[in-house]
Image: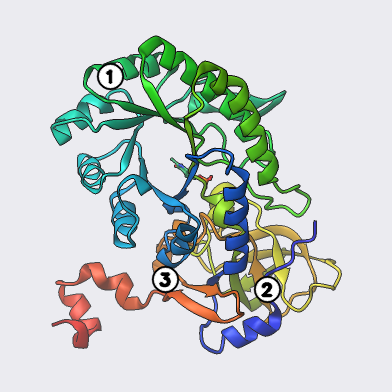
Amino acid sequence: MNKIPFVTKKQVEEITKTYPTPFHIYDEKGIRENVAALQEAFSWNPGYREFFAVKATPNPFLIDILREYGCGCDCSSLTELMLSDAIGIKGPDIMFSSNDTPAEEFVLADRLGATINLDDISHIPFLEETLGHLPKTLSCRYNPGGKFALGTDIMDNPGDAKYGFTTQQMFEGFRIMRQKGVEHFGIHAFLASNTVTNAYYPTLARQLFELAVKLQQETGAHIAFINLSGGIGIPYRPDQEPNDIRVIGDNVRKVYEEVLQPAGMGDVAIYTELGRFMMGPYGHLVTKVIHEKHTHKEYVGVDACAVNLMRPAMYGAYHHITVLGKEEQPCDHLYDVTGSLCENNDKFAIDRMLPKVETGDYLVIHDTGAHGFSMGYNYNGKLKSAELLLREDGSVKLIRRAERPQDYFATLDGFDIYHKMFPQEGE
Ligand SMILES: *Cc1c(COP(=O)(O)O)cnc(C)c1O
């Protein structure tokens, strides 16, 4: 499949008159169409709810769009809870799916009335001690161990993952919580990441539904919801076939009708905590070519770096690149596309065929809408970029300004050096 940017060269030239590169830009139209399709795909389940994984794209303007379609927030830290609360997503509209959780985060989650999803059996007494009570509704994250496979394809390795309760701990934990007065239970699992196949959710659902039936039968616990969490992936590579959310929703329905309904559990709500699927394809990192270097290899140097998008440096992840205005030209030149960090892994692409690139060209780095900006950091004192929203009417709205040097030095406030640099702000 040809990956076509949602902005043209002409649009970018216009935008950069106000907002210099690099920046992340998000496509409102794409976000809306996708979330509407998701809601439709699971509309067979009356309790269905998507809790957007805030860590993927923690921008209130974007989360607000999802909220219009009934989405809540999935949080896993203090500041993610604070952000959700501040934008008016409250109480059971928040799912708190954390791990290795500090006590203060449980306190805030409980105060906000969030649904707490426990990562470990030891968190039951920890939570009770921290809060002085247990909430009436609690969820547990499940990790069956071993490998997660679809047929003969191994998708991921839960046995190596730090998350979740073992099968035996699920039964023990549910019994303990029932004794302690918990009334409604949830089951959560995230067993494979970025799955580009329609089979992941239905396969996971069968595993969780069968577990839910046993848990209810053996412990008497009322299972209120089953949370399929994240993991539905996106086609980062042009040759990948995108997931079809309608097929996924329909196949989860079939398993629901096959496993849960006959067990008298036709009232269980299905929850999801998608991040990548909700936003990934609807973000671009737009960057400008500032250098061409010809040494042992051919290098294209851009004004963004791994601070703006660390997935290639961190995981060797593929992100497709389009040279704006050269969409129709043949990809007959071999390049490494680099940022400016003093780190040789600061490369957005290695040995990538592109059209002939020249200084001043704008590159679109695709699929940066999730786990893109949000993974940013400040190595080499590099500053995080702005985030822009391309509205449906074609206008552009600034939804986060770029960092300034003041922001980078702000935690030195109170030290002489900060006041020397920014005397006017030091009072
Ligand atoms: C990261 C995460 C998600 C979202 O994962 P995606 O791959 O972006 O869909 C959901 N739930 C939890 C608990 C997570 O840690």
Q: Nearer the viewer, residue 236 or 127?
A: 127
Rendered position, 186 above or below 38: above
Q: Residues within 10 Å of mark 2 (few under 14, many from 20)?
A: few
Q: Residues within 10 Å of mark 1 (few under 14, many from 20)?
A: some
Task: Please tell me whether mark 2 sits on a helix, a strand or a loop.
Answer: strand
Disc 1 vs disc 2: Cβ atoms closer than 8 Å? no
Q: Position of residue 416 (x, y in %)?
A: 15, 76
Task: Please tell me whether mark 1 sits on a helix, a strand or a loop.
Answer: helix
Quadrant of the frame with the N terminus: bottom right
The amino acid beneath tag 1 is Arg
The amino acid beneath tag 2 is Lys
Rendered position, 188 above or below 46: above
The amino acid beneath tag 3 is Leu
Q: Nearer the viewer, mark 3 or mark 1?
A: 1
* Residue holding disc 1: 178
Question: Mark number for residue 293?
Answer: 2
The mark nearer the N terminus, 3 or 1, is 1
Separation of disc 3 and disc 1 at Cα? 49 Å
